[in-house]
Image (spheres, rainbow, N blue to C red):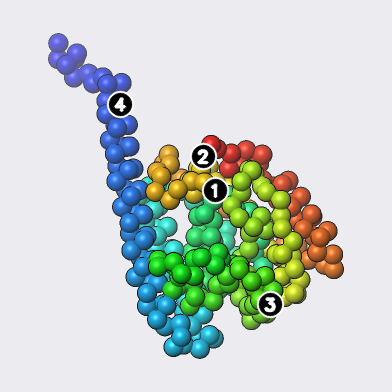
């Protein structure tokens, strides 16, 4: 009798454990989102006020460092909470590189956050609408990020940033991948790299979650934890034929990314 009463039916506890885990993930997910939003706001407002007061050579490094630190803190919080699994250490070999173009595939909106959190001198091309975003606009302007609303000035400024020793991060697909594992590449990134006379360093990103893919809302909770894998790939020279280089780089990414990379329904 004593032996039978000591036994525990583990199968009866499993549904409760799953419900408890689901409840934890929901609370942690929305709490981390709220903290991320507040953190962005706390930096964006003073950064926007500092931009007209500081010369570019001083303001931009401060702005880039501020965004890097904020993203690093937010990712640390996600990892501690058990919501995110990713090893960003492969990016450390690029940390001190100067005057290069980083070409990355773009499965989710989190890609830029992952890379910027590890690299302190990154300049990005952003949607022009983000410049007026309350949560991100001030930091983006201070960091010297480039709006995508004027192609010729954008290419000129991007080339200038690379020549100054910055790392230009671009997504050759132009936007988040609509047809995984990869969308066709645009030519503009090769024009910028060629104008700067800079090598193109590839970074390959694989995501097991549909969170923040094209069409996925920010506040819609995915299955957790989210898992990313990042690899530093080969480095390329643009050469004299930009169109041929674009085809060569796209073929490289398609060969390196698994066919199922990022495949999930939205």
Mark 3 to mark 1 CA distance (whole Å): 29 Å
- The residue depicted at 83 percent of the width and 58 percent of the height is 244
Earlier-in-chain disc, 2 versus 4: 4
Helix, strand or loop status at disc 3 = helix
Earlier-in-chain disc, 4 versus 3: 4
Q: Nearer the viewer, residue 133 or 243?
A: 133
Q: Do the residues labelled 1 and 2 touch (CB within 8 Å)?
A: yes
Image disc number at residue 156: 3
Task: Let me know if residue 99 appears in the view.
Answer: no
Q: Nearer the viewer, residue 227 or 245?
A: 245
Residue 105 location, x and y as percent? 63, 54
Badge 1 density bin: few <14, some 14–19, many ≥20, Cα 10 Å: some
Mark 1 to mark 2 CA distance (whole Å): 8 Å
Earlier-in-chain disc, 1 versus 4: 4
Mark 2 to mark 4 CA distance (whole Å): 27 Å
Mark 4 to mark 3 CA distance (whole Å): 58 Å
Earlier-in-chain disc, 1 versus 2: 1
- The residue depicted at 66 percent of the width and 61 percent of the height is 103
Question: Is 13 placed left or right of 170 in the picture?
Answer: left
Residue labelled with disc 1: 214
Residue 183 location, x and y as percent? 67, 48
Question: Is 12 placed left or right of 87 in the picture?
Answer: left
Task: Let me know if residue 174 appears in the view.
Answer: yes
Residue 130 location, x and y as percent? 49, 66
Image disc number at residue 266: 2
Residue labelled with disc 4: 15
Helix, strand or loop status at disc 1 = loop
Q: Residue lying farthest left?
A: 2
Q: Are marks 1 and 4 in contact (CB under 8 Å)?
A: no
């Amino acid at each position: 009798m004593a032996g039978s009463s000591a036994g525990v039916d583990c199968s009866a506890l499993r549904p409760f454990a799953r419900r408890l885990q689901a409840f934890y993930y929901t609370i942690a997910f929305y709490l981390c989102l709220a903290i991320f939003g507040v953190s962005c706001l706390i930096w964006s407002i003073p950064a926007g006020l500092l931009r007209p007061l500081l010369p570019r050579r001083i303001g931009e490094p401060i702005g880039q460092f501020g965004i890097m630190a904020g993203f690093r803190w937010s990712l640390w919080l996600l990892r501690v909470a058990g919501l995110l699994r990713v090893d960003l250490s492969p990016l450390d070999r690029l940390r001190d590189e100067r005057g290069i173009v980083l070409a990355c595939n773009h499965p989710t909106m989190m890609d830029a956050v992952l890379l910027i959190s590890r690299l302190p001198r990154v300049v990005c091309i952003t949607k022009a609408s983000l410049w007026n975003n309350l949560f991100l606009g001030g930091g983006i302007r201070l960091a010297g990020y480039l709006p995508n609303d004027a192609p010729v000035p954008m290419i000129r400024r991007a080339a200038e940033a690379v020549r100054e020793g910055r790392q230009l991060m671009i997504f050759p697909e132009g936007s988040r991948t609509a047809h995984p594992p990869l969308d066709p590449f645009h030519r503009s990134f090769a024009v910028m790299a060629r104008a700067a006379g800079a090598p193109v360093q590839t970074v390959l990103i694989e995501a097991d979650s549909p969170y923040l893919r094209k069409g996925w809302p920010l506040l819609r909770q995915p299955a957790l934890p989210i898992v990313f894998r990042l690899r530093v790939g080969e480095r390329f020279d643009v050469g004299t034929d930009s169109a041929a280089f674009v085809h060569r780089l796209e073929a490289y990414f398609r060969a390196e990314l698994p066919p199922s990379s990022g495949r999930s329904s939205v």
